Amino acid sequence: EPEVTQTPSHQVTQMGQEVILRCVPISNHLYFYWYRQILGQKVEFLVSFYNNEISEKSEIFDDQFSVERPDGSNFTLKIRSTKLEDSAMYFCASSVNLVRVDEQFFGPGTRLTVL
Amino acid sequence: AQKITQTQPGMFVQEKEAVTLDCTYDTSDPSYGLFWYKQPSSGEMIFLIYQGSYDQQNATEGRYSLNFQKARKSANLVISASQLGDSAMYFCAMREGNTDKLIFGTGTRLQVFP
């Protein structure tokens, strides 16, 4: 069964460093998403991406964040200058088409720890 | 105001029994979808069940069913014949008609005991 994959599973970085979290969505999916979950808290939407551009973003997704689909398979989230409060689990998700209530398939997550 | 409210931080159920996890939502959009996800201790998010706002019947997926009461804006998850492997966090989420994002509740931790 096709699945969303994410690398690395765990990333440790120093405050102020740049990190890139990588995701490979399911191959025929067209919509891509990033969510984050701070430890013990609820999952929060960051950004959605369709047709090589941001479709929607939350207030969390400020200028420190960017997303890119550098090739036909990868979808990346970059945090330019990490802060302690960026420590969280980051989930990538994808969905197949334009139907608004389509299921979003989540990847296993990348746990980011900022020291 | 919270869009998704899960009032039960934790629930216990004995193996083979049924359990209901509560979820209420708030939206003025007539078109929306409601989702339940399971998050085991390993951390991944597993889709369980979906209910559309225009669906006439309650959704069912195997041992999972959704008790959708539109007038009360509730979408409770019912797990029948609980198994030890059902122990996990359960999140209710909503997607409104004109947005891409899922809005999650704070979750309910379910523990199934023998």
Image: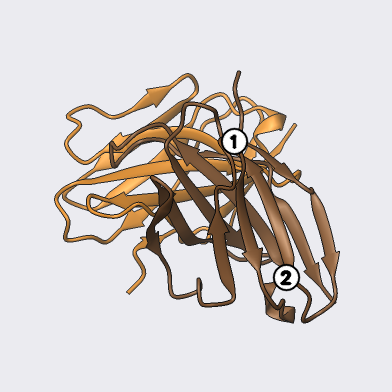
Chain colours: A brown, B orange
> Where in the figure is residue A72, as x and y percent of width and height?
56, 36
Disc 2: CA contacts within 10 A as few (<14), some (14-19) or many (>=20): many
- Choose between A19 and A35: the one closer to the eye: A19
Amino acid type, callout 1? Ser
Disc 1: CA contacts within 10 A as few (<14), some (14-19) or many (>=20): few
- Choose between B78 and A91: the one closer to the eye: A91
Amino acid type, callout 2? Ser
- Choose between B112 and A21: the one closer to the eye: A21
Is B17 on the left or on the right of B33, as rendered? right
Is A41 on the left or on the right of A57, as rendered? right
Does the residue at mark 2 contact the one at mark 1 (Cβ under 8 Å)?
no
> Where in the figure is residue B7, as x and y percent of width and height?
46, 61
- The reply to whether residue B112 is visible in this rendering is yes
Q: Which residue is mark 1?
A: A73
Is B27 on the left or on the right of B2, as rendered? left
Is B16 on the left or on the right of B79, as rendered? right
**How many discs appear?**
2
Query: Which label belongs to residue A98?
Result: none
Q: Residue furthest front?
A: A71
At 67% from the left edge and 65% from the top edge, which residue is drawn? A40
Query: Which label belongs to residue A87?
Result: 2
- The reply to whether residue B104 is visible in this rendering is no
> Where in the figure is residue A114, as x and y percent of width and height?
80, 73
> Where in the figure is residue A91, as x and y percent of width and height?
61, 51
At 41% from the left edge and 31% from the top edge, which residue is drawn? A96
Relative to A20, say whether B2 is above or below. below
User: Which chain letter matches label 2?
Assistant: A
User: Which chain letter matches label 1?
Assistant: A
- Distance from disc 2 to disc 1, alpha carbons, whole Å, reads 26 Å
Q: Quadrant of residue A100?
A: top left
- Locate the C terminus of chain B and report the quarter of the image it occupies: top right
Callout 1: SS: loop
